[in-house]
Image: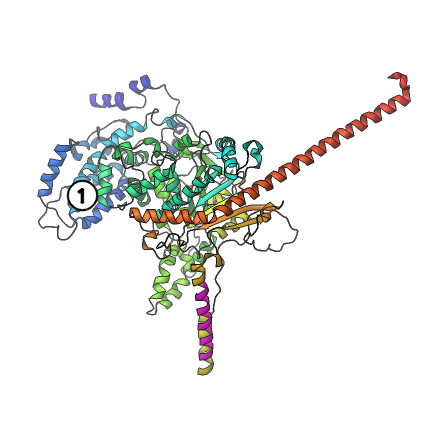
Amino acid sequence: MRQLYLRRVLLGHNSRLLRQTYPRRRKPISAQFNTYSKPRKSIPLHWLKGLFAAGAILLAGGHFAFNPALYSRHDRLQCDSGERSSSFDDYDNSNTEDGDFDTEDELDQRPGGRSEGNPNDDTSAWQTIGSTLTNLGAAKANISLTSIIPEWTLLLPFYFQKLRAELSMAPDSLSYEIWQESLSPYLNPEITWDAQVRMSPNLCDEETRFLERRRRFMKGAFAQYLQIPESEINEQDIPVIAMTASGGGVRAMVSSAGSFWAAKNAGLLDCTTYTAGVSGSCWMQALYLSSIGNTSFPRLIDHFKSRLTVHFAFPPAALSLLDSAPTNRYLLRGVVERAKRGNTSFGLVDLYGLLLSARLLIPGNELAVNDDDLKLSSQTRYLRYGQNPMPIYTCVRHEIPTLLGSGKGNELEKLKEAAAKDWFQWFEITPYEFYSEDLEAGIPTWAVGRRFYNGFNLERDVPEMKLPLLFGIFGSAFCATLNHYYDEIRPFLVGLGWGLQKVDSLIAERRSSLKTVHAFEPASIPNFVKGLGHLLPPTCPRSLHNADIIQLMDAGMSNNLACYPLLRRGRNVDIFIAFDSSAEIQTYNWLGNAEGYAKQRKIIGWPISIGWPKETDTDLERDLSNAQALSKEDAKERLEDAQKADQATEAIKSMQNTNPSKSLGYCTVWVGTKEQKDTNEEPPPSKAVEDEWELMKPDAGITVAYFPLIPNPKVPGVDPDSSAYLSTWNFEWTAQQIEATVSLARANFEEGQDKVQRTVRAVYERKKKLRLEQERRMRESRERDMEGSWKRAESHHSQAGRLFGHGFY
């Protein structure tokens, strides 16, 4: 009883110690909703099993044992380092109020008791974690493994023993300290703020104020970029420029850094209002606006060279950071905070983000880690004066309608029907807000991770979701559907021959069903629109009205360029600049896919049918099939004709590869039109801009400048299609490969630098001309009104003179 009293005094939320330090807070909103109020729990097994799965796999499922000499070495290491060596089993009987640490008697007295095989029982889960890590860290060996597996695997038990102790949630463990720090308003001031859902299609107030500051800041930079006296520039004439970079893993992260660096050196980035990313380019944005990059691209690229030489999943490198101070506290903070709340589960995507962050979010000097870099909302310090463009991070949710009804006969038809109706909802995260245009709802970024109901948060003491977990969501391309996976392996499969074309045709008949299955479970966050179904627009799926979670994944599953958030109402983008480093860049026309979104949202001015031109089919297969029914002479003649046509097409392709100007060059510019036509006919495709006067037409719409990552003779030996290290799935780079990729991106931008500058000037002159014309019309309207008023006054004067005589005046 005495121990329980001391725990309540020291740890309880209403303890005297906390009341003396911080003012008493009002009752949390969760008390108003008893349905969602629940005692705090220990971290469940499913949160951390993924963290240790990698080690278990490397240990061959635990079937191998280890050399006894390892454990004497482990004991020496533990004594030398002075680390905590308390046994995990010693902590099982500790207890505190609110269910934080339960005794055996308390567990048995719970409603329903405690069953050994219940996966939802958190204490049972912790015992399983303890026994699992004990087996990993304390196995005895009877064979030598050095000839079978790498020598570094012998250190894994030591790493796991340390993790077992630090993640035990026992007093004085690292996880316990992180949990206590999460309750500090000094470290997490957001836990003292209430949040509510903002239901509106308009921009949030914080972004509106940022736009005002950004326009003032850009005025001088814009004058310098176009070599115009600053005094002659009106802020209303400055075009709203937005840059987006594509997804593509580390390749996209490195190449987008090179493209943005070139734009920065040219002065274009300082004239840009928004930047948006997908997958790897989201990582680049986050690192650029952190203490690691500190808004310096040379510094950011040096960071890449020092950190990408080791694969993010290499266990010794990752586990040493997770076991050593101060990086362990820095990396595990978000995991422990989410795990203790239990609002969402811990999965493969979260583990992936944690391992990525161990490479990307740790500076070369590991002692220089900065907790401010863990929160996206902290990036407002780089936007406070409008000194940088506002970053937009993206992810999507895949809506797959539930199959209703039963019966084996029509299951395939139901799958096809469901796949035909599936679609993606886009979510954007800025330093100010987490928002979805499909839901027309958003919450403050610092409130991501909280549970909401009917528009209000159910708890306040939930710190903001940390960046390592978001890194996993941004880049979770492996959560793609089976259809995406088959697209990746299909060229290889068909090229093997061996009659696999028949297999391909059979799979093609069921491609629609492959679109409904994800290879891996996406990450999840609490559903912030729960209970708001009566206020949500028709574009919001009904499945979200009362769902507990929202599953999110890499936005590249929908479009590998972040076009949609930049076309959102209120952002009024004039010039859209896209840096595309996607794989198979000519096959998937990501830029052209935005046309459907523009039509759906009734966005006027987006160019029609832009992007890579479609290849001409030779119909070789059709000619071969027809040849079977003809004579040998006719068949031979048709076959030769088809082969000649195919050779001609290959020649054209080779010309396009060697001379980009025959297809799309280093920089291609299109412009839409705002002209409204009464006819229902489709407008003609937009042509690439040849002369800048096309951009100055009064009815000109949105201007798009497209920079694909294609080979450049100025950077020999770098080809995104053939250089193996430029694969999306490559995570281990050399400094020379990083330098070559950055050089290619910069060289490609420099090829189109003058064209972009002329484009910006043309759009500026058009906006200026339209403003002056509008001011002239308004001035003439005022003059006409004044003239009319004067004439009416004179008429009244003359009438009065006739009635009363001039002497009256």
Residue 355 visible in rendering: no
Residue occupying the point 41% across, 61% down: 510
What secondary structure characterizes most of the magenta part?
helix
Q: Secondary structure at mark 1?
A: helix
Location of mark 1 (residue): 156
Confirm whether the magenta stretch covers residue 285.
no
Residue 557 visible in rendering: yes
Left or right of residue 702: residue 177: left
Q: Nearer the viewer, residue 747 or 601?
A: 747
Left or right of residue 392: residue 741: left
Left or right of residue 448: residue 205: right
Locate the C terminus and report the quarter of the image it occupies.
top right
Which residues make up the magenta segment? 635-652
Q: Is residue 386 above or below residue 625?
A: above
- Residue 603 rendering spot, x and y as whole percentages: 56, 45
- Residue 461 rendering spot, x and y as whole percentages: 36, 28
Q: Around disc 1, counting alpha carbons within 10 Å, would you say few (fewer than 14), some (14 to 19), or many (20 or more)?
A: many
Confirm whether the magenta stretch covers residue 649.
yes
- For residue 262, which quarter of the picture? top left
Locate the N terminus and report the quarter of the image it occupies.
top left
Left or right of residue 424: residue 42: left
- Residue 450 rendering spot, x and y as whole percentages: 39, 34
Q: Nearer the viewer, residue 560 or 788?
A: 788
